[in-house]
Amino acid sequence: MLILLFLSPSLWTEAQEMQSDEMTSYKSIIPVEKQSLLNNIDMIGNTQMDFRNDFQNGDYLGSKFRIEQFRMEIKGYVHPKIYFRFRYRFTSTFEPQSIDKIIKGVDFAYMTFTLSDRVRLTAGKTYADWGGIEFDLNPIDIYEYSDIIEMADNFLTGVELHVKANDNHSLGFQLLNSRTGTFEDLYDTVPDVTASKVPLAIVLNWRGNFFDGKFSTIWSYSLFTEAKGIGMNYIALGNQFTSKFVDVAYDYKISIEGLDRTGIISNEIPDNLYNYAVRNTLYQSHWTRTTVKFSPKWHFSLDAFVDLASWRDDLDPLKTANHFRTVYSVVPTIEYFPWEDFNLKFFLGYVGRFYKYSEYARTRPGLMLQDYSTGRVIIGIISPVKFL
C-alpha cells in the first residue's frame, strides 16, 4: 500500500498542493503543464469490509472484523486512443505466477487501443470475458460467489478484439493463457496425461441490449486446452431485466472438464484414494439475483443459487452414478445508501450454504462425506472510494 501511494503521481500532486498552500516556495514534482493529464485518470479503492459472525451446522464459531475485498484501481487515458487499467487485489497472494510472471493479486494490467469507432484491441492481463451477470458485477457487490466463479482463474493474460456491431450489440474475441500457473502447479502429476505445450484459451462473448436497455444479455463460450487431447468447455448465459423498482438477473453456467479444472471433486477425494486430479468432471450453476428498490436509499437484494458437481469417469468401480454433490445457497441483504452524491452503502445480510452429497459420496468407503451447512451474519460497508 505504501509503495503504491508513493508511486501514485495523483497522490503526490494532491500532497504537494496541500503543502503549497503553506509553503509556496516548493516546486511541484509534476510540472504544471502536465498536471492536466490527471483529468483523464481515476484512482479507486474498491472496498468491502464487514463484521462477520460464522456458523456451521447451526453452531456458532466466532466473530471478527474482516476486509473481504480491497482492490486498488488506477485507470484512464494516456492518449485519446490509448486506455489503461491497473487493479491490484490486496486480499490475494503476492507470489508471481509461473506462466505470466505477474503477481496473482493483479487483476488488471492492460492497455486498450481504439482502432476505430467500433473496434478496440486490448493486450495484457485482463478479465476472461466469461459471460454471465454475476462475474460482470464489481466484486465488492458480491457477498458470495457461485462455485465455478469462485474456483476459476478469472484474470488471464492475452489479447482481446472487441467489435461493437451497433449501439445495442457487441462481440468479443479473446486469446488468453488458459491458466496463470503451470500444469504441474495446478494438477501435479496425472497418470497417462501429458501437459499441453500450448495452454491457451479462446473466449467468444456476445453482449446485447433490448427494449431501451431494460433487458440485457452477456453470453459466452470458452474453450481451454489443458493437456494433450484434453480440454475444457465453458458456457455462460447471463440475462438481466432492469426497471425503476425491481432488477432481476439469471445466469446459467456449465463447465465440462476433461481434467478437474474447477477442482472441487478432486479436493473432496482423499489422497489415499486418488492423489491427483480426477478426469471427466462437470459443473453447473443456476444463479439469480433479485433487487427490490423501495427507495433511492433502501434496497433489498436476494441472491439464490444452486451449484451441481458431477464426476462422469468410471475410474472407481464402486461408483454407480455421476452426480457427486449439490450446494444450495441463499444470500438476503438489506442495503442502505445514505448519500445520493457518494457511492457508498451499508449492508446487513446473511450468507447460507447447504451442502448435500450423493449416496455414493456418503457411503463409499474412504469417502463417507457428510451433509453440512455453513452460515454467516454480516454487517458492513461497501464503496468504490474514488480518490482521484
Image (tube, rainbow, N blue to C red):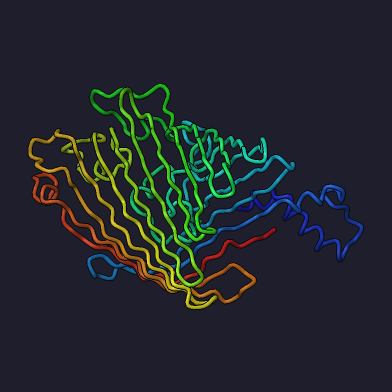
Q: Position of residue 388 (x, y in %)?
A: 70, 58
Residue at 22%, 54% (x, y): give it.
326
Give the tally of numbered discs: 0
Q: Position of residue 351 (x, y in %)?
A: 34, 66
Residue at 42%, 23% (x, y): give it.
198
Residue at 33%, 30% (x, y): give it.
231
Q: Position of residue 62 (x, y in %)?
A: 33, 69
Q: Is residue 243 above or below residue 266?
A: below
In front: 272, or 228?
228
Q: Is residue 93 above or below residue 293?
A: above
Side of 201 where 60 appears, left or right: left
Side of 160 where 182 appears, left or right: left
Q: Position of residue 261 (x, y in %)?
A: 32, 38
Query: Which residue is farthest right?
Result: 25
Residue at 68%, 48% (x, y): give it.
76
- Quadrant for residue 122, please give it: top right
